[in-house]
Image (cartoon, rainbow, N blue to C red):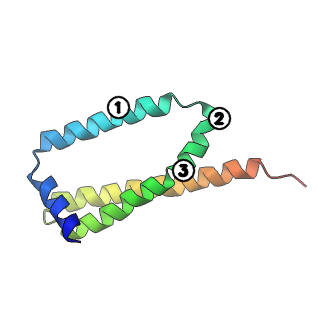
Amino acid sequence: MAFTLAAVEAVDRTPIITLLAIVVLAGFVGFFVISKVPNTLHTPLMSATNAIHGIVVLGGLVAIFGAENALTKALLVVAIIFGTINVVGGFLVTDRMLEMFKKKD
């Protein structure tokens, strides 16, 4: 828990422009990586990344307890909500994909 609180404190001391630059660059990298994946591999790749989104949600839940600023807490709540939507949507898409491979009676 001490490591997590130290990480949150380090983020609180980082200039906002640096944090925004990281988010923008991560968005561009993610877009270009995913756009190169063929359609036949996109759904299995999405189902495999559900674990990563679950870790993001868990990290947000842990970080929200160490946050002292109201803006930080609000952003963490939004991140947790979006992460949860992504996890649930990923599992629904994976379930739908697996239904396609079942034999029809």
Amino acid at circle 2: Thr
Please state the horizontal and vertical placement of residue 10, each as a whole percent of the image. Answer: 13, 55
Q: Residue furthest right?
A: 105
* Total tally of numbered discs in the picture: 3
Q: Is residue 96 above or below residue 25?
A: below
Q: Residue furthest front?
A: 3
- Per the image, the residue denoted by label 1 is 28
Label 2: how many residues lie within 10 Å, few (<14), some (14-19) or many (20+)?
Answer: few
Mark 1 vs 2, N-terminal side: 1
Q: Quadrant of residue 38?
A: top right
Residue in the picture at 24% in, 39% down:
22
Residue in the picture at 40% in, 55% down:
83
- Per the image, the residue denoted by label 3 is 48
Q: Secondary structure at mark 1?
A: helix
Q: Secondary structure at mark 2?
A: helix
Mark 3 vs 2, N-terminal side: 2
- Per the image, the residue denoted by label 2 is 40
CB contact under 8 Å: marks 1 and 2: no
Amino acid at circle 1: Phe
Image quadrant where one finds the C terminus:
bottom right
Mark 3 and mark 1: span between their CA atoms?
A: 21 Å
Mark 1 and mark 2: span between their CA atoms?
A: 22 Å
Please state the horizontal and vertical placement of residue 96, each as a whole percent of the image. Answer: 67, 51
Please state the horizontal and vertical placement of residue 76, each as a whole percent of the image. Answer: 27, 59
